[in-house]
Amino acid sequence: MSTSLSYQSMSKEQQTMDNLEKQLICPICLEMFSKPVVILPCQHNLCRKCASDIFQASNPYLPTRGGNTVATGGRFRCPSCRHEVVLDRHGVYGLQRNLLVENIIDIYKQESTKTTRPERKSNQPMCEEHDEEKINIYCLTCEVPTCSMCKVFGAHKNCEVAPLSHVFQGQKTELSDGIAILVGCNDRIQAVIGQLEETCKAVEENCRRQKEQLCEKFDYLYAVLEERKGELTQIITRDQEEKLEYVKSLKKKYADHMEIVAKLVESGIQFMDEPEMAMFLQNSKGLLQKIAEASTGFQMEKIEPGYENMSHLTVDLNREERIIREIDFYRGK
């Protein structure tokens, strides 16, 4: 019973230590924080070296000295939450050291040395060719992890090998650098995307403005055409009124003459019925004189052939049509 309780207590303690360790892992190098700094304002932590690597990858054109970026302003994104971090002229060295996390790491390391962790041993990969042999070296020739027996007696005896921890740290550093570069590339791509979005908005706004200006110019041209059409229409109307007035005056003149002739004819018919010759001769002289004047004194005015034609007011717009169809955008040099 005592052994069981002791094991359970140890298991819970180990679980607590594991959970604590997960909170102390840098998201870039995947190791415990080394000189952790706080990224404001999102409050996430990074190793100062990892923060410097990300900062250099996000700002590749900033001057460097001795592998470190010279203190200057810049920006990068937090790898945990993608929040944009703006640095002052001190750069990464202007970020505040997280002393609390450093103290927790020191306490964790002290406690971890006192606690046995058998479950960690069970996770150690073993060699498939040699029983009870742990994989503890890395074959640089074949680029695979292996065990010492494989190097001495096995398939990798003629290969170049290195300690597993060295290769592990090297590849982890390479992976961390690669992640930082990718993060920096994404930041630059995001900036380019932002510029492209602004360009799209500018293109749409400029096109809208150009369309408005084009419509205004064509509306002005329509107004000029309407004005000129009205002026030419008035000319046709005036010519029509002049001709109609002349024709109507002739029509009235001829109608008045016909009325006078009709009255003379009626008077002549009445005189023809006069039985007294003396009376007839006495009154007929004046009537005959009026008939002679009506017959010979009236002058007929004839309208010239084609008087009603209005073809002299025809407009030829072929040249103007060609000019309108040739309207195009001005292309300055």
Image (spheres, rainbow, N blue to C red):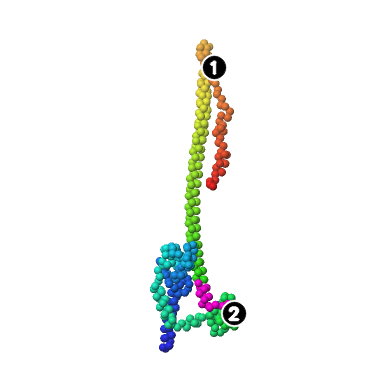
**Magenta-drawn stretch contains 164:** yes
Any part of residue 85 in sight: no
CA separation, marks 2 and 1? 151 Å
Crowd around label 1: few <14 · some 14–19 · many ≥20 (10 Å)? few
Q: For the point 53% across and 17% down, which residue is it?
A: 293
Crowd around label 2: few <14 · some 14–19 · many ≥20 (10 Å)? many
Farthest residue, direction left: 100
* Quadrant (top left, top right, bottom left, bottom right) of the N terminus: bottom left
Counting residues from the N terminus, which is met first, the one under dot 2 or under dot 1? 2
Amino acid type at mark 1: Ala
**Magenta-drawn stretch contains 108:** no
Please state which of the two labelled residues, at mark 2 or mark 1, is closer to the viewer: 2
Q: For the point 50% across and 42% down, which residue is it?
A: 221
Q: For the point 57% across and 39% down, which residue is it?
A: 319
Determine which of the numbered discs, if any, sits on residue 156 in the image.
2
Q: Which residue is mark 1?
A: 292
Taking 232 as reference, is 213 above or below it?
Answer: below
x, y (%) of residue 322? 57, 41
For the magenta stretch, what is the residue range?
154-173
x, y (%) of residue 225? 51, 40
Q: Which one is nearer the viewer's eye here, 85 or 194? A: 85
Determine which of the numbered discs, if any, sits on residue 68 in the image.
none
